[in-house]
Image (cartoon, helix red, strand yellow):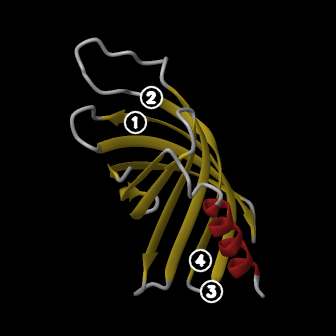
């Protein structure tokens, strides 16, 4: 079994631990990657955030899993009815470009707006990333997205 398959299986097993999450949100993310976003909130302060992006034309695939800490006390709006938590944490990414596979560590920080009246949240994040395999390189990826809160 190659490393890509093994790591993907590991990611999905980690997600299985969060199946009984307090809140599950599904949506889209634009930036790095362009694709789908799945947020599994275990409790108010701990989130497992997944992103998957792909492009069949260029044989491109990207999977990210981030372990995030949410802080609801940093931004407290008085005129807005929703919540604005700040989040930060670490993640892992697997990126496949044509025949090359990159494995990297992600350092995530961002802010999210959770609407009170409707089941949606929007987010913006900056993700400095250190690719470790097959060679070392560093990038900074911005992302913006919207998710529908399923439960």
Measured Cα–Cα span from mark 3 to mark 2:
39 Å
Q: Going from the N terminus, do you reach mark 3 or mark 2 first? A: 2
Q: State the CA–CA distance, disc 1 to disc 2.
A: 6 Å
Depth order, front residue of 57/150: 150
- Residue 92 as seen in the image, left or right of residue 143: right
Residue 1 position within the rendered picture, expressed as x and y whole percent measured from the top left: 78, 88
Q: Position of residue 107 (x, y in %)?
A: 63, 44
Tell me the tag on residue 91. none
The answer to which of marks 3 and 1 sits earlier in the sequence is 3
Q: Tell me the element at label 2.
A: loop
In the depicted structure, whether residue 59 falls above or below residue 53: below
Residue carrying label 4: 96
- Residue 62: x percent and y percent? 54, 70
Q: Position of residue 134 (x, y in %)?
A: 75, 71
Q: Which residue is mark 2?
A: 85
**Is residue 71 toward the left or the right of residue 136 in the image?**
left
Seen at 52% across and 33% down, the residue is: 44
Sequence order check, earlier mark of 2 and 4: 2
- Numbered mark located on residue 99 in the image: 3
Packing grade of label 3 (10 A; few <14, some 14-19, many >=20) is: few
Q: Nearer the viewer, residue 53 or 16?
A: 16
96 w.r.t. 32: above or below: below
Badges 2 and 4: C-beta atoms under 8 Å apart?
no
Q: Tell me the crowding category of disc 1: few under 14, some 14 to 19, or many 20 or more residues within 10 angstroms, Cα based.
A: many
């Amino acid at each position: 079994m190659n490393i890509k398959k093994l790591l993907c299986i590991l990611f999905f097993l980690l997600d299985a631990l969060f199946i009984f999450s307090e809140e599950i949100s599904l949506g889209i993310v634009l930036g790095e990657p362009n694709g789908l976003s799945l947020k599994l909130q275990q409790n108010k302060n701990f989130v497992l955030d997944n992103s998957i992006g792909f492009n069949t034309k260029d044989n491109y695939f990207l999977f990210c899993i981030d372990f995030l800490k949410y802080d609801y006390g940093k931004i407290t709006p008085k005129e807005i009815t929703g919540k604005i938590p700040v989040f930060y944490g670490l993640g892992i990414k697997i990126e496949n470009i044509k025949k090359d596979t990159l494995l990297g560590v992600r350092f995530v920080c961002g802010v999210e707006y959770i609407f009170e009246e409707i089941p949606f949240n929007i987010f913006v994040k900056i993700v400095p990333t250190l690719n470790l395999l097959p060679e070392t390189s560093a990038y900074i990826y911005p992302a913006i997205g919207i998710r529908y809160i399923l439960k």
